[in-house]
Image (cartoon, grey):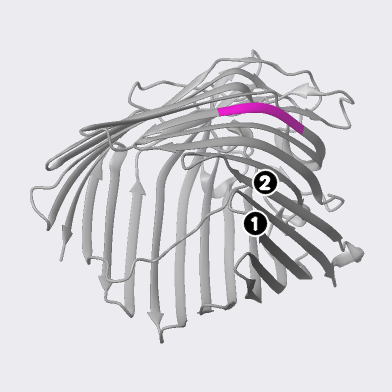
Amino acid sequence: MLYGSEAMAGVVNIITKKGAANTVTAGIGSSGQHHYAANVGDDRLAVHYNFNEWRHGVDVSKTATKFGSTRTTVTDAKKQSAGISYQLDDHLSLLYNYLETESKFSRYADAVKAGSTIAQGNLFNNRKYTTQRHITQLNYKDKKVKAGVYFNTGTVESKGVTNFQNTAKGDKETEAPRYNTREKNITYGADVQRRWILSPKTKWILGSSVQREQYDKLLTYTTKPAAQYARNNFGVFSQLEQAFDARNTGIFGVRETWTNGAWMDKNYHNFSASGQWLHKMDKANNLYVNVSQSFIMPTFAQMYGSSEKAIPNYNLKPQKGINYELGWKQNHGAHKWKAALFHMDIKDNISASWKDKKNEYEYTNEDFRNTGVELSWDIKDAKPLSYHWGVTVQNPESKSSPKGYWDRKYGRVQLTTGITYKKDKWASNLKASYLCKRVQTPSSEHSFDAKPYLLTTWNTTYEPDKANELSLMIRNVLDRHDVISHSSSTYYGAPISYMFHYTYKF
């Protein structure tokens, strides 16, 4: 958990496991779910494939319209990926991944006002969304230098019927007005960083990055004319780690970011800094203080995208913020405690605000702030049971130009908990996340109270031997029909579902 429900950033560290077991997996579940996967390789060469499918319809949202309201159902959701990685030598590796997704969304008349031309339950419109992405990386790493070059490209397409009622006979999809958008993203670049150990107490890192972004709004019969946007991104950064004594260490960083070549001179530059102080109270207890500035540029999709529901805004500003955190950690045997006070101020936070009258999202800048406290407790080795729990009490608020005042956002109290049973060949884990004191925040009206939501997952695994594994995962164990969105639109969590897997290791 990172600052509760409104967490804006995080760090992901991916470590590939050399010599991992080769596996094949097959799974089947409710709502027409299927899953197939294979991982084959050795210390140098590895190949993987993964396929997920959810065939049957699930209601995901409810939207107000001029004639009443509609409900949206998703069907035939598919996701598959494949990739290959090759370790050329001890320092150089090559990676390629391909990802493809497909899903169908159908909107039905859910509630109809008197005098409307559409009947309740009739199909209003539909959409099919597809994506294809290619990711290629060449990475180098030794004790002092990390470097990489990459080339990534992807295409997103949406197509379907705009309104089934606007047809000659009212029931033939071929006569209905069509909707189609396609866009392509290309990103390539390089980054390098060098590490020096200046003394037993002093470490220094210096690095730089260069990136080319290109966004193509492709020509379709509803996207005219085609357009292309691009920009060049540059960055230079440095970090100094200084151990002042056996108890106190400081980590200080700076970064300069700038762009050029953007359409209509939509270029940006920013200097940001960060500092962290670590104090060891004793073997088990540590105190820390973090102060860091953030800088996030608007994406091309947010500025120029062709999505039907999310209206782009080429006047978006970059979001700039500062984050403060004061915390304590204790590691005592099987017990891990953490307590933290935090505050963040974000200027021109980029958000997608729902416009009821237009029935669409619009990208805008708004200020955002949040103050709170976070507590967590972990017991890892209390066999056969282990537990964890966490609580965040916070006060997230936003201020946009239509309102001119600070309004509540998201939820004020978030609770997370989990329990794991592990003995012999069995392992079972139940985890839950509960968010209360919630509000939904329209773009131009005051926020209003919303019911809490509870998300639950239960996973049980049985390993009869080293080669075989059986597992059962149940999502939304209590089958709650919770609203999980925080704008004035209504999006639901998926109903209860189960998935059974068999994995063979060789």
Residue 275 appears in the picture as rendered? yes
Crowding near pointer 1: few (<14 within 10 Å), some, many (20+)? Answer: many
Q: Residue at x 68, y 38 (%)?
A: 325
Crowding near pointer 2: few (<14 within 10 Å), some, many (20+)? Answer: some
Question: Could you tell whether 468 is left or right of 420 in the image?
Answer: left
Q: Nearer the viewer, residue 128 or 353?
A: 353
Question: Gap between marks 2 and 1, in whole Å?
Answer: 8 Å
Q: Position of residue 457 (x, y in %)?
A: 35, 32
Question: Could you tell whether 23 is left or right of 435 in the image?
Answer: left
Question: Could you tell whether 314 is left or right of 31 in the image?
Answer: right
Quadrant, the C terminus: bottom left
Q: Residue at x 64, y 68 (%)?
A: 203
Asked if disc 2 and disc 1 are in contact, CB closer than 8 Å, the reply is yes
- Can you say whether 141 is above or below 48 in the image? below
Q: For residue 252, which quarter of the picture? A: bottom right
Q: Amino acid at mark 1?
A: Thr
Q: Residue at x 52, y 59 (%)?
A: 131
Residue 170 appears in the picture as rendered? no
Q: Position of residue 336 (x, y in %)?
A: 43, 35
Question: Could you tell whether 271 is left or right of 124 in the image?
Answer: right
Q: Which mark is residue 308?
A: 2
| Residue for badge 1 | 181
